[in-house]
Amino acid sequence: MVVKSAIKKSDVLIEALPYIRSFRGKVVVIKYGGSSLEDDESRKNILQDIVFMSYAGMKPLLVHGGGPHINERLKEIGKKAVFVDGHRVTDKKTLSEVKKIFAGLGEKIATEIKELGGKALALSDGTDGVIKAEKLKAEQGNLGYVGKATSLDTDLINSLMEDEVIPVIAPIGKDDKGTFYNINADSVASKTAILMQAVKLVLLTNVDGVMKQDGKEPALIQSLNEAETSRLLKEGVISGGMMPKVTACLDAVKGGVNKAHIVNAKLPHALLLEMFTKRGIGTEITK
């Protein structure tokens, strides 16, 4: 039994070899947030996967969110979370709390990556100016200090990656006047993947991927191309919270990223399974 188990493990490594060879030296942008970021075991699995990728010669870049943490903090100070068009309405007080939470989360993630044997640097309070942004105008109402990413300090990020440091970036940007903006993390990850010429964008979430109703049970759609994705969005098959994630993936692919993936972060070692196996476990969106 011991020998059979060892052989099985070696088969897994051999299956991963062509993917490791293909992705060596390439940038992979990973967006990580939501409830799984709060779960210690899930977070450790994901960060172990990212450290593995770094040691395998890849250049992982982590964009983190923090929605549940922000909601909890706003509740503590008596502020109600308000969303318009999927964006958090952000006044000055909310922005201040968001920056503090992101700074704390970024440092926590970077520290845990180091404890797992990797190298990391948190760029998570916006003061470093890694993300340039402009105010986002909503179709309905005023979003306050909500922006969209316009550019990225790619020189800084590339210099970190050359030293095998994993950048840990929060979706906070500022404009030329020094005004800070809260930005949707999925859109930041998509923009980052395009500007860094990433080979892959991976959005980690709390569901298995894009689902379709197949009989009584929903079924995972494992692969979609641009045209199929656009059609499913138009038909409303992709809706709700999955819409901004799929849109971010579609934008990335249109912008030159080879593949985008939506993966359930709560599955043990979800990143490695999606990156280094033929079948994968989530939904991939391709050109």
Image (tube, rainbow, N blue to C red):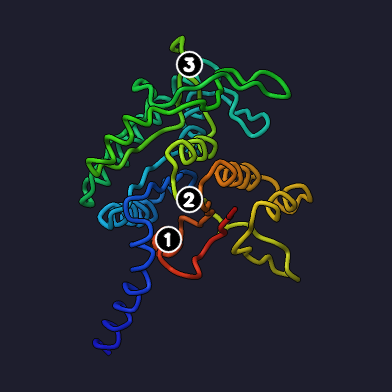
Q: Amino acid at mark 3?
A: Asp
Side (left or right) of 243 relative to 30: right
Does residue 105 sit above or below 273 in this rendering? above
Percent of width and height locating residue 20: 34, 62
Q: Residue at x 24, y 44 (%)?
A: 164
Mark positioned earlier in the residue sequence (1 or 3): 3
Q: Which residue is mark 2?
A: 202
Q: Residue at x 70, y 20 (%)?
A: 141
Q: Residue at x 37, y 73 (%)?
A: 15
Q: How many marks?
A: 3
Judging depth in this view, the residue of 250 and 89 nearest the camera is 250
Q: Which residue is mark 3?
A: 175
CA–CA distance in space, label 1 to label 2: 9 Å
Does residue 12 sit above or below 156 in this rendering? below
Percent of width and height locating residue 59: 33, 47
Q: Amino acid at mark 2?
A: Val
Does residue 264 sit above or below 217 in this rendering? above
Q: Are marks 1 and 2 in contact (CB under 8 Å)?
A: yes
Query: Can you say which quadrant of the picture contains the N terminus?
Result: bottom left
Q: Which residue is mark 1?
A: 275
